[in-house]
Structure formats: structure tokens, C-alpha cells
Image (cartoon, rainbow, N blue to C red):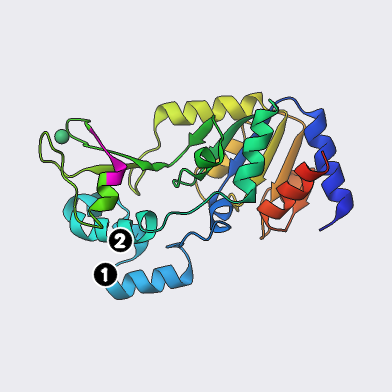
Amino acid sequence: MNNQMISDFAKLISNSRNIVFFGGAGVSTESGLKDYRSEDGLYNTVKKYNVSPETILSRSFFEAHPDIFYDFYYNYFLSCESEPNRAHICLAQLEKTGKLKAVITQNIDGLHQKAGSKNVIELHGTTKKHYCPKCKTAFPTEDVIALKGEVPRCRKCGSVIKPDVVLYEEQLKETVIEAAISAISAADLLIIGGTSLAVYPAAGFIRYFGGENIVLINREQTAYDSKATLVFREKIGEVLSETVKIM
Ligand SMILES: [Zn+2]
């Protein structure tokens, strides 16, 4: 870890009044979550179901094969209880100081809230909420977990319950897009972590940033590296905790 960069990052945070964090999968993987996008995840999914994870997580597949969908969904998203890591915890601390105004995440695991963050904009929804797509009745997530991959059905109308996540073939919610754009437009420091920004809609949102400084924390190179004031290649939890430590 480069001490000068950590100290520069701490200075940027001190001098900013409206910080927004934009995060991707890399924030969650440090919590040891099983990642269906990894090589293992892909291999095991195709071997077990004969289709790719992306196909299972699509709206049309959910409607045609809810049994396979829920078996996969339980296995990758509900079966293990994960804990927030240092990245989640540091971001919650920064929010408490009043400097960090919003966390925008592409993850659906609810770990930012579990760490104590209040203003979390979940672009792809959350596995912590389930509802009936037909009559909109909420279905308790603990009941979905108790079913261990069986298909949950609405107690009022019998329809298949849906996780409150944005599946492939579905659009992001308008209200969520607006909240994300409004937070990014108002920010003077944008911290981007654990995302290569290659996937829609991440890159699109970054265009709305009109502030001074972008700090990028990602293991791999991104197309935005040249626009950033600081670029870290280390683990996001490490970078944030070292930075918060010296503040
Ligand atoms: Zn219903």
C-alpha cells in the first residue's frame, strides 16, 4: 500500500463535503460471497442446470421455470448468511460523519445496510425483499429462506413470488435511476470501487458527475483510470480502512 496515496485520499475526503460511493461486485466478494459470475460458479451452474447463470436470472426463465430459478437463487443468494466487510463498515462510518451522502451499489445483498449505511441506492434491487408481482403483497424473506429453494407462492393469489431484484431483460426502476443521478450530480468527490465500469448502466451514471475528484479502487484497469485523481489497485476494504484510520 502506497502511504502517500492513502494520505492524499484522506486529504480529499477531508476537503470534500458531498461524497458519493459507487460500488460493484468487488465490494461484496471481499465478504466471501459465492459469486455465480466466477469460473467455478459458471461451470457448476451449467453442469447442474444445463444453462448459464445469466439465463436463469432472466425474467423469461423465471416465469417459465420458477423451480430451477429458486433452486439456483437459494443456492447462490440465500443459503449463506454473509457479513459486511471493512469496505462496508468504513463507508457506514463516513456516512455518520456527514461527509458521505449516498452509497450507490450494483450489489443486491443488503450488506451496506447491515453495516449501518442509511442512504443506499440499490440499482439492481435487493434479495432482502420479496413480493407478489401480481397483487404486490410482500412476502417475508425469512419464509423464502425457510423454503430452501422451493418455489414460494403468494398467500393471497397463489402467484409465484419474485425477489425484488432486477433480472436480466428487466429495466432498472425509474425512481432508483433518478436517485442515483441526483446523488452523483451533487457530489464533489466520487469514490468508485469494485467495478470495472464496463457493464451497463455503471458507466452511464458516472457521466453525471461534475465534481472535482474521482477516486478509483479496482483490482483491474478501467476505462476511467485517466479521469481519476487517484487510482488504487488494492483491495477496497484495505484502501478504505487504511484511509479512515489516519483521518
Ligand atoms: Zn398475490
Q: Residue furthest right?
A: 4
Identified at 68% across, 40% down, the residue is 191
- Does the numbered disc 1 mark a residue whose Cβ is under 8 Å from ligand 1? no
> According to the image, label 2 marks what residue?
72
Is label 1 in contact with label 2 (beta carbons under 8 Å)? yes
- Residue visible at 65% across and 23% down in the picture: 186
Mark 2 residue crowding within 10 angstroms, few (<14) / some (14–19) / many (20+): many
Query: Left or right: where does residue 50 sit relative to residue 218?
Result: left
Name the foreground residue: 212 vs 125: 125
Vertical comparison of 65 with 186: above or below: below
Q: Would you identify the image quadrant in which residue 219 lies?
A: bottom right
- Residue for point 48% across, 66% down: 38
SS for callout 2: helix
- The residue under label 1 is 49
Crowding at dot 1, Cα within 10 Å, few <14 / some 14-19 / many 20+, comes out as some
Q: Quadrant for the N terminus, please.
A: bottom right
Q: Could you tell me residue 154's position as x and y percent?
A: 16, 39
Residue at image position (44%, 72%) is: 40
Amino acid type at image mark 1: Tyr
Specify the segment rendered in magenta: 138-142
